[in-house]
């Protein structure tokens, strides 16, 4: 009898052990299965890489079972690679896009990314960024960028064009403060030229910087809202207008008066940045994204401001939010992917972005910038944001506009074509493109 009881007891122990072992195995398997792998792709060579890495770690800390792999790709290849990757069998969950028809239109048209309107409502993006700022990410489902349909992306920092200036050079020329009007700006250029120096460093070999300074002058003479409507293909808008004519003629006037770099159409854009950083010239009209490099060389002698106001009495110029974050239509965890995007783009990301040298896109950064130059860039952005003065980027208007603008500006400033011919050529490109969408 004892033997029988003992056997039953031992069998019971064995059964319990077996059950425990099976439970442990099942639990281990469940733990493995609950680990979620996510992929994020972004363009490399951008200052926000370190900031994004820090924010991704923050997201992973809040989700212990999530592992995010970040892949960086050179921007030159990125716009070609990302549609192929999103269409593949191992599409990333979150990717950076690019506004306008160069990339985002393709991604939407091919249904490779999903609308984010419900997430914008959930996370409060509309209030945080403002409707006008988000219009650059709104497209129709067929890929037409109208600035008012569904929201497909969100950008977490700003990329806008302003004026870097050399404070020491201004003082040497007898100016104790940066110019506030176009007349004062030109007075500095004139005095520099009288002393044998080109006040505005302009490297336009590839043509891109020409679009930025022309856009700054268009912002001075015209209306940012009108330019955005033209970019979005609104009927009745035209490139052939008085503001654009005055802006083109003003830039041509600077060339004729010797205010800009000699042989500017043969000078690479990076060379103008280098020259300015080494103390040449007084002004450099370019994007906020070069701040770190310029600061390293000029230190306390470099400042930043918006291009002077014009008749509109608003700060208007070339600028936008950063490359947008998108959620892949093939993501197995779209809600989680949208939460990752929110971690990259919400108000709590502000201090992290500032720490890594980027100005947050929204109204309240949430922390002070780490140096005087970034503070000045932040102030300039808030001025432009308050005035709703973003022109966006002129080349977003058609798939071939960048080439058309770059070549046209080089030719009009080089004397090969007239201002009227330049304006007409740009408008024709726009009209021809719009016809393809209105068939």
Image (tube, helix red, strand yellow):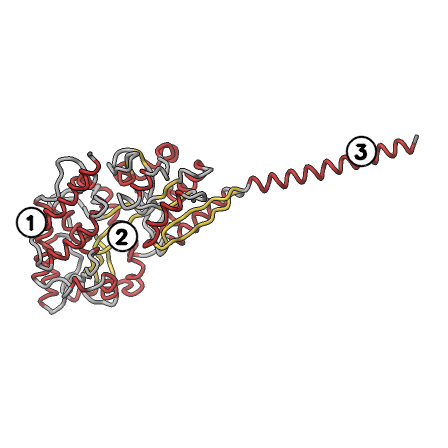
Element at label 3: helix
Residue nearest the viewer, comparing 248 with 257: 248
Residue that sits furthest to the bottom in the current view: 196
Image coordinates of residue 75 in percent, x first then y, are 33, 53
> What residue is disc 2 on?
377
Q: Earlier in the sequence, mark 2 or mark 3?
A: 3
Image coordinates of residue 174 in percent, x first then y, are 13, 64
Q: Left of 12 or right of it: where is 324?
A: left
Disc number lying in front (1 or 2)? 1
Task: Name the residue at 25% across, 67% down.
Answer: 278
Disc number lying in front (2 or 3)? 3
Q: Is residue 268 above or below residue 77?
A: below
Q: Left of 15 or right of it: where is 42?
A: left
> What residue is disc 3 on?
12
Image coordinates of residue 145 in percent, x first then y, are 25, 38
Disc 2 crowd rating (10 Å Cα; few below 14, some 14-19, many 20+) is many
Q: Is residue 416 above or below residue 339?
A: below
Report the Cα–Cα distance between label 2 and label 3.
74 Å
Report the Cα–Cα distance between label 1 and label 2.
35 Å
């Amino acid at each position: 009898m004892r033997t029988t009881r003992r056997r039953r007891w031992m069998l019971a122990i064995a059964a319990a052990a077996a059950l425990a072992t099976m439970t442990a195995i099942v639990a281990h398997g469940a733990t493995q299965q609950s680990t979620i792998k996510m992929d994020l792709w972004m363009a490399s060579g951008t200052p926000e890489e370190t900031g994004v890495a820090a924010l991704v770690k923050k997201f992973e800390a809040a989700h212990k079972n999530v592992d995010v792999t970040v892949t960086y790709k050179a921007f030159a290849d990125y716009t070609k690679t990302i549609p192929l990757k999103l269409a593949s069998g191992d599409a990333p969950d979150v990717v950076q896009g690019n506004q306008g028809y160069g990339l985002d239109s393709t991604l939407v048209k091919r249904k490779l990314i999903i609308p984010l309107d419900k997430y914008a409502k959930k996370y409060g993006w509309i209030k945080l960024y403002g409707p006008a700022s988000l219009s650059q990410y709104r497209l129709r489902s067929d890929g037409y960028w109208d600035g008012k349909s569904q929201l497909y992306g969100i950008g977490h920092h700003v990329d806008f064009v302003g004026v870097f200036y050399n404070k020491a050079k201004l003082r040497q020329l007898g100016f104790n403060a940066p110019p506030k009007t176009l007349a004062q700006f030109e007075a500095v250029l004139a005095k520099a030229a009288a002393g044998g120096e080109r006040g505005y460093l302009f490297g336009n070999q590839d043509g891109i910087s020409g679009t930025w300074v022309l856009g700054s002058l268009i912002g001075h003479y015209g209306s940012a809202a009108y330019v955005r409507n033209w970019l979005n293909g609104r009927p009745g808008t035209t490139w052939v207008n008085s503001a654009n004519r005055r802006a083109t003629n003003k830039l041509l006037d600077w060339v004729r008066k010797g205010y800009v770099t000699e042989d500017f159409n043969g000078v690479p854009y990076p060379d103008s940045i280098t020259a300015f950083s080494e103390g040449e010239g007084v002004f450099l009209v370019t994007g906020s994204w070069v701040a770190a490099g310029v600061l390293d060389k000029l230190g306390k002698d470099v400042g930043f401001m918006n291009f002077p106001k014009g008749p509109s009495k608003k700060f208007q110029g070339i600028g936008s939010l950063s490359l947008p974050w998108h959620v892949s239509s093939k993501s197995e965890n779209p809600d989680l992917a949208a939460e990752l995007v929110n971690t990259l783009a919400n108000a709590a990301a502000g201090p992290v972005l500032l720490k890594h040298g980027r100005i947050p896109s929204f109204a309240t950064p949430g922390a002070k910038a780490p140096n005087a130059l970034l503070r000045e860039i932040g102030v300039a952005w808030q001025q432009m944001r308050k005035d709703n003065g973003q022109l966006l980027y002129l080349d977003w208007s058609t798939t071939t506009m960048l080439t058309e603008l770059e070549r046209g500006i080089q030719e009009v400033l080089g004397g090969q074509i007239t201002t009227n011919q330049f304006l007409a050529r740009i408008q024709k490109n726009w009209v021809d493109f719009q016809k393809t969408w209105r068939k």
